[in-house]
Amino acid sequence: MQFHIITIFPEMFDSYLKGSIIGRAIKDKKISIKFYNPMDFCEPKKRVDARPYGGGPGMVLRPELFLKAFSKIKIPSKIPRVPLGKKAKIILFSTSGKKFTTGYAKGAAKKFTDIILISGRYEGIDARVQKILRAEEVSIGDYVLTGGELPAMVLIDSISRQIPGVLGKYESLEEERVSTSEVYTRPEVLKYKGKNYKVPKVLLSGNHKKIDEWKKGG
Ligand code: SAM
């Protein structure tokens, strides 16, 4: 899977993409990440943003610069009329977009070879970019962030986990089979401020049927 990120702040991704499972997935060539910075196409002494038509406090990102950045993306599956071919997806982050879920991540990991992620800033990107590229607007939740870089990292992380070989065999099987957010490790009894906090007995029982039932909430 290739992720192509259009952002004016590519350096924000540096440490995140080096670490842990995602860093390993890049090293193992399970995923690759390319950046396209609209700033690179900005005329000297001009700004990447401009005042909004109709007024308002925030600045709007200029469409030509995002379209120029987009035009640098090279995808082998390009076919006429479908701008980037059937196996490529264009996502533009927006607070009012389609809600991102694990289901979305699973579908995307299966269907696409290339995903283009367009991150906004300030008041957003001139709406014509979304219209011209027929990009799908995606939101990662009902809150407003300062930019689309965190959403891009969220999608990369969540979609990459669904790509075969990115998680270790055991981790991915375990995730498919039964998964819970309530997890425990040593010590069996944790002493904190005079109180004892114990690991649930069932997890120490060795009875895997019962453990699975407990993980499923039963
Ligand atoms: N008033 C604008 C709005 O409601 O869309 C605020 C834009 S926000 C400050 C700047 C950019 O951050 C957006 O254009 C979008 O790319 C990104 N963004 C912010 N919150 C987001 C969210 N919950 N999901 C996806 N993208 C988000």
Image: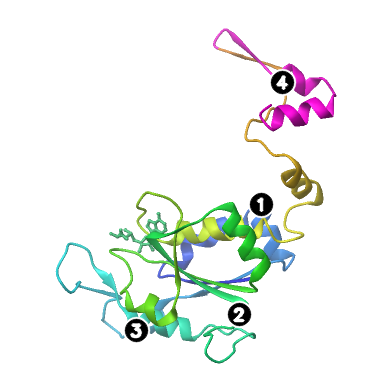
Please say whether residue 111 is visible from this viewpoint: yes
* Outermost front residue: 218
Which amino acid, by three-letter code, is at mark 3? Glu
* Label 3: few (<14), some (14–19) or many (≥20) C-alpha neighbours in 10 Å: some
Left or right: where does residue 21 sit relative to residue 151? right
In x, y percent, where is residue 55? 14, 68
Ligand 1 under 8 Å from disc 2 Cβ: no
Residue 132 vertical placement versus 91 (above, below): below
Q: Residue at x 75, y 60 (%)?
A: 164
In x, y percent, where is residue 168? 78, 51
Q: Which residue is mark 4?
A: 187
In x, y percent, where is residue 197? 63, 15
Q: Residue at x 73, y 39 (%)?
A: 178
Which amino acid, by three-letter code, is at mark 2? Lys
Left or right: where does residue 80 sit relative to residue 32? left
Q: Which residue is mark 2?
A: 86
- Mark 1 vs mark 2: which is more N-terminal? 1
Ligand 1, by image quadrant, is bottom left
Ligand 1 under 8 Å from disc 4 Cβ: no
Q: Which residue is mark 3?
A: 64
Q: Which residues are magenta?
A: 193-218
